[in-house]
Amino acid sequence: FGEGNNASEDTELRFATCQSLWSQIKLETEQIQENLNKQLFDNLISFLRQSHSEFQEKTTEWTYQMKSREIPTAALVLGVNVTDHDLTFRSLSEILQNNFTPYIALLEAKDCPGIKNLMQKLMRQLMNCYVDVDSLEDEDYVQVSQNRIRCSMTSIINWYESVTKKTDSETPSKKRTSSSRHCQSPPVVVIFKDMESFTTKVLQDFIVISSQHIHELPLVLIFGIATSPMIIHSLLPHSVSSLLCIELFQSLSCKEHLSTIIDKLLLTTQFPFKLGEKVLQVLINIFLYHDFSVQNFIKGFQLCIVEHFYSQPLSVLCCQLADAKKRVNSLSHEQCENVRRLPSFRRYVESQVSEKQIALLTEDNFLKEVIQKLLEDLHFYNENYVSVLRCLHVFTSSLPKYPLGKQIRELHCACLEHEVWETEEYESSLQLVRMLNKSDLVTILQQCVEILGSSSGNEFDKTVEKLKEFLTQFQKLEAEAFQERDVSVSSQKELQKKTDLYHLQKTLLELKESRRSKKLTKFEMLRFEVVDYIDSLVRNYLVPADHKTLHEIMYFNTASVLRGHLNAAPRIALHTALNNPYCYLKNQALKSDGGSMSNKAPDICIVYKLHLECGRLINLVDWLEAFSTVVMAVEGPNADAASSDQVDDTIHARFIRAVSELELLGFIKPSKQKTDHVARLTWGGC
């Protein structure tokens, strides 16, 4: 904050506001994720308690499991969003340690290429010690609490018996305290975070060994699965999978998780910061087409907050309304000029009369009063927008087709992008709404009454009264509907009495003609009235955010900047850094005109620029001479009084190091054709 052109008087306040906003959002996201995983974790803990109670009570069922050597196993299907699994397992291990058992080990495939490495990792996490698995057979021991133990399942059993005996021998008060948090003789929970990545042999060996000692060690396995539960049977033969007593647990899908995050963070008045349509679409597209990672979406959201407060000097006003009004009074003249430069404010000024235009552009005090009013309108717009958007989503999500999308995030993007009532999707949605039956329409109106009634302020009081009036009218139509039904039945009976062909044909023609000229029923007229009223709410309150004055203060719309941060282009970044180091280092000495080279640049930059002028094969001797010429051209007059041999050795060493760095980056490689040449690997501009 405050570097270069973005420096301003209120950088500290902007930085503090940014930090405060992100800390609130971070706490909210953690609470959301905890609530989403609560049901899953509760089911897991109940499964673990049930499995452990069978071990404690030594019931017939557990005896049967002992004989068959079945290990209680939870297959936890988390989905393909692998980057989110770490947070899920960390939360799970914390909950288990706090409420169930202190003995938990989290194993990853990269740390367990063999059964010895797996046992080492398991013992290290359970015993909190270092285990040397590369030692010889007669030295295959480790030092734990001044006792030498063997790296094996027997060692873990002996350790478990010793720690449980210590717990049993504690004083009653300590024992009561520990038992309130953990059960008696708590089981050992081993979590395989990425089961698909483990080799078949490692899993087979561990399961077979563990099943042989299951009567001595209350072991419970948790398999983290990203794809399908069938992977268990694909990795393990029947002889091994039959040793597991498997129960399946399914986590919430990542799409539902994302919808909840967007609903709680963006479609709320709790946080003043908002995302523009293009920015939100970039984050959603990365989520849908790259990794399905909710954590990466949250990191992208954090990046938007930092970029907004860094690049927008007026983001100091991106706070709650009461604080924003106070900060408006302390705006400096320069900050008032920043307000006048905003495109949305320019449009606002152009729509005013000439006298007010002059006052807005010349008088700071008058401008501050107008800014307070415009900020108040913007906050009210955000509150009303969310309420009406939820009502519209209730209508569109109840349709058999979803022209505007099934999820509320899709509807939100459509409303931010343009005036949604001008789109074909909106018109087709209204046509479908006009065909809803009475029960569905009444249910939808009741939900809308709840949504608008729970909104803050008195903006929707008349709207709620109007919707309740519609509900009352629908109830009155029920009695009339019964009467119309009786009339239609009597007309059908009269038609059945006329058996003469002429009279029958005449009656049918009269019925057909009456249906053509038939007026709308009261229910149909009322349904049209309801739809028209909802349409008026949409047109009044779901105006795109970029149509509102001062929306730049709260809405981050620079999608190109975000795309540049998130969509990596390593080749372009490398070329820019090596060809123009000033772009990243911001050192005035590195500024160069055109294609000139400065000896102040890093050696690798000089070598890179020289290599761009060469062909497929580069002569190292010529390259060194060119490098020496560039370096010595400026250094010569100011060089120290050293011998030419020493200077040559220094330059030679610098050149070798720079060439080695270029080879490491993949720009060149040694040539087999000529020993004193290297081959160039990259071509074309970036």
Image (cartoon, rainbow, N blue to C red):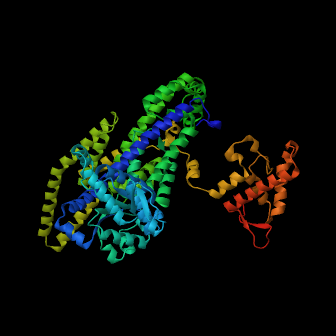
116 displayed left or right of 34: right
Q: Is residue 642 above or below residue 68?
A: above
Q: Closest to the observer: 678 or 434?
A: 678
Instruction: Tell me what residue is drawn at x 39 percent, y 70 percent.
Output: 203
Instruction: Tell me what residue is drawn at x 71 percent, y 53 percent.
Output: 578
Q: Closest to the observer: 461 or 146?
A: 146
88 displayed left or right of 501: right
Q: Is residue 268 above or below residue 316?
A: below
- The answer to whether residue 417 of the structure is visible from this angle is no
Name which quarter of the figure residue 677 lies in.
bottom right
Residue 106: x percent and y percent?
A: 40, 58
- The total of numbered circles placed on residues is 0
Instruction: Locate the C terminus and report the quarter of the image it occupies.
Output: bottom right
Residue 352: x percent and y percent?
A: 54, 30
Q: Closest to the observer: 229 or 535?
A: 229
Residue 8: x percent and y percent?
A: 60, 31
Instruction: Locate the N terminus and report the quarter of the image it occupies.
Output: top right
134 displayed left or right of 428: right
Q: Closest to the observer: 453 or 25?
A: 25
Residue 57: x percent and y percent?
A: 18, 61
Q: Is residue 394 above or below residue 157?
A: above
Name which quarter of the figure residue 215 lies in.
bottom left
Name which quarter of the figure residue 184 lies in.
bottom left
- The answer to whether residue 303 of the structure is visible from this angle is yes
Instruction: Tell me what residue is drawn at x 40 percent, y 49 percent.
Output: 261
442 displayed left or right of 286: left
